[in-house]
Image: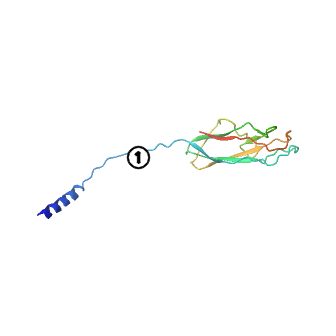
Amino acid sequence: MGMAIILTMTFASASALADTDTGALDVTATVISTCRVASTSNIAFGDYDPTDPADNIAGTGYGRFRCTKSTSYGTYIDRTNTMTDGTDNLTYELYSDAGRSSVYPSASVGTPSSAASNAVIQADIFGKIAALQNVQAGSYTESVTFTVEY
């Protein structure tokens, strides 16, 4: 008799679990509008001959970044346009086009672009050192900051 009670209780428990009820819950996330610099490359002009009447246009580089899809962004490079060797100054300019006709912004951008996806975007940078600058031989540098504004 004791075994019959145990079997009955086991079957009763199993059938009690056959009923169900449901409740709804939401799964949420907030996607932020953001941009992140992925990498940059140095702009190295190589040798500059201050006696050559032609501009040095050997310097090129880039800034790579990602933005959330549909985020409006602009880029600029904070700089003084002056490299120094500690004594003399060598001026240069940065451009956003290979023809070196559109000066790269050095402060906040007026007309933004919109990210088509969150894939890497590359902003090419083209440099020019004007010819015939009166400077001494040496190594000239300036540290600049590539910025993505969104």
Between residues 86 and 61, which one lies in front from this camera angle? 86
Residue 37: x %, y % from top left: 61, 45
Q: Which residue is mark 1?
A: 27
State the residue lying farthest toward the left: 1
Residue at the front extreme, as displayed: 86
Q: Residue at x 24, y 54 (%)?
A: 19
Left/right of residue 17 with respect to residue 59 in the rendered view: left
Image quadrant assignment for residue 99 = top right
As displayed, is residue 40 above or below residue 134? below
Image position, residue 140 (x, y; %): 78, 42
Quadrant assignment for the C terminus:
top right
Quarter of the image where one finds residue 139: top right
Scheme by which the image is coloured: rainbow
Above or below residue 35? Residue 10 is: below
**Dot 1: element:** loop
**Quadrant of image for the N terminus:** bottom left
Residue 12, horizontal then vertical, whole percent: 19, 58
Q: Where residue 118 appears, x then y in whole percent?
A: 56, 48
Specify whether 127 is left or right of 69.
right
Identified by mark 1, the residue type is Val
